[in-house]
Image (cartoon, helix red, strand yellow):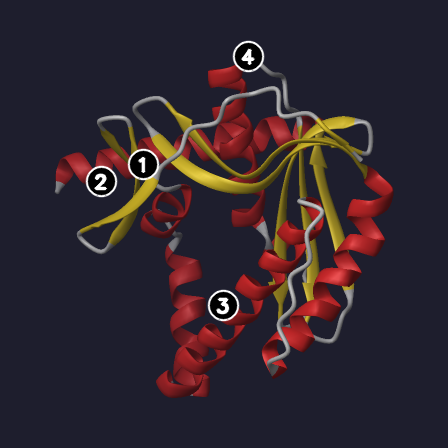
Amino acid sequence: MNINYQFEYPTSTRSLIQGSRHYDIGQDKLPSVTTILAATQSEEKKAALAAWKARVGEEQATRTRDQAAERGTVMHHIIESYLKNQFHVDLTPVGLQAHKMADKIIQEALRPKLQELWGLETVLYYPDLYAGQTDVVGIYNNQESICDFKQSNKLKRREWIEDYKLQLAAYALAHNEVYGTNIMQGVNLICTGDCQFQEFVFEGDEFKQAKFEWLKRVDQYYNQKDSN
């Protein structure tokens, strides 16, 4: 893998505004990509989430969410250390599981396919609209790409990860706008707790459409904000 830090990405701090994550970019406080996605969720998705919480109970739902978040955080640290040519060790039970998951993503995807690294844990923003942080920007499988790592409790279907796809589209739009690139591929690299790996690649017309759908969500978010 070639390291090519050719772009100067902004440093940023995060802040909460009325409970929603924002990024401080210069003098602006821009809503995060995840904040916009959460605020513009479909009624169908809200109902599905509410039904799951009702089925498993609020306490179990919170525990499942927190465990997954902890595992995902450790997994990200391990992958980030690998890409920095460092070594991160976590010998806790969660850490040992996360190590196996991170190694799976590294062996199946990053080692054979990530050819050039432009940015790692990269803060990106679209001026005046939104900001966020993506895991990797670079050349993946011969294409300029945005890549995000995800952990999961079970295997995903493509139709279940629409928000993941919109996240990638949001980051690609921001990078292209600020740095004059032409990123037309988004990649989700997912590993389950029992180390089953999935790669989802979004490109071509599907990724173009995702960019349009993301901009609709941005427009919806600001319309809702104005009406409130």
Secondary structure beneath label 4:
loop
Name the disc covering residue 61, or none: none
- Residue located beneath label 4 in the image: 180
Instruction: Choose top left, top right, bottom left or bottom right for residue 176.
Output: top right
Instruction: Choose top left, top right, bottom left or bottom right for residue 145.
Output: top right
Residue at horizontal 50 percent and vertical 76 percent from the top: 67
Q: Camera-side residue: 95 or 195?
A: 95
The residue positioned farthest toward the right in the image shown: 112
Mark earlier in primary sequence (2, 3): 3
Query: Residue 161 location, x and y as percent?
Result: 59, 53
Query: Residue 87 location, x and y as percent?
Result: 69, 58
Residue at horizontal 63 percent and vertical 50 percent from the top: 80
Within-10-Å neighbours for mark 1: few <14, some 14–19, many 20+: some
Mark earlier in primary sequence (4, 1): 4
Dot 1 amino acid type: Gln
- Residue located beneath label 2 in the image: 224
- Residue located beneath label 3 in the image: 69
Q: Nearer the viewer, mark 2 or mark 3?
A: 3
Dot 3 amino acid type: Ala
Q: Nearer the viewer, mark 4 or mark 1?
A: 4
